[in-house]
Image (spheres, helix red, strand yellow):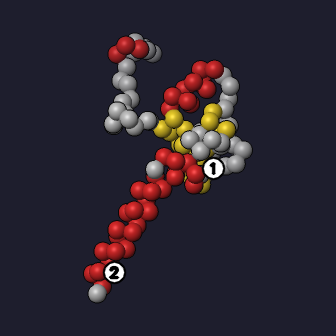
Amino acid sequence: MSVTPASTRPVAVATAPDEEQTVTVTCARDSRSHVVAQAVLADSLAAGTGHCTALCGHVVLPASLASPPGDGCLLCAETSGAGRRARRRGRIGFGRSARAAS
């Protein structure tokens, strides 16, 4: 097995300069999926601490990758903006269907 040198490996790039890349991690303590910045997760893995802090402030003890994802953390969704986007889409769809029915 050959290993690609670090200098030639593809690197993940944020879609916008001010947008932080995140990953969803299920916590073994509360069984919820929390949003964690990739840099924070990488730092915790490198330090060997076994836990990291989610966007909502919850200290996440990552569950096994074999475990199913938990219900999403509502505070993480609000903090990351995912909750606002989902609600906005829902309102637009409702408004259109209400007008179409009139």
Residue 24 x %, y %: 53, 42
The numbered disc on residue 32 is 1
Which residue corresponds to the image point at 61% horizontal and 26% vertical from the top-left?
44
Question: Would residue 40 be found to the left or right of residue 50 on screen?
Answer: left
Q: Nearer the viewer, residue 20 or 72?
A: 20
Q: Tag 2, which secondary structure?
A: helix
Which residue corresponds to the image point at 34% horizontal and 33% vertical from the top-left?
17
Residue contact between numbered discs 1 and 2, judged by CB atoms under 8 Å: no
Q: Is residue 7 above or below residue 60?
A: above
Q: Which one is earlier in the sequence, the residue at label 1 or at label 2?
A: 1
- Inspect the image, locate mark 1, and give the three-letter code of the amino acid beneath it: Arg
Residue 16, located in which quarter of the rendered image? top left
Question: Would residue 74 be found to the left or right of residue 13 on screen?
Answer: right
Q: Nearer the viewer, residue 48 or 17?
A: 17
Residue on which disc 2 sits: 98
Residue 31 x %, y %: 67, 49
Question: Would residue 84 be found to the left or right of residue 96 on screen?
Answer: right
Q: Is residue 44 above or below residue 80?
A: above
Q: Disc 1 and disc 2: Cα gap in Å?
A: 35 Å
- Inspect the image, locate mark 2, and give the three-letter code of the amino acid beneath it: Ala
Q: Tag 1, which secondary structure?
A: strand
Neighbor class of circle 2 (other Cα within 10 Å; few <14, some 14-19, many 20+) is: few
Residue 52 x %, y %: 63, 33
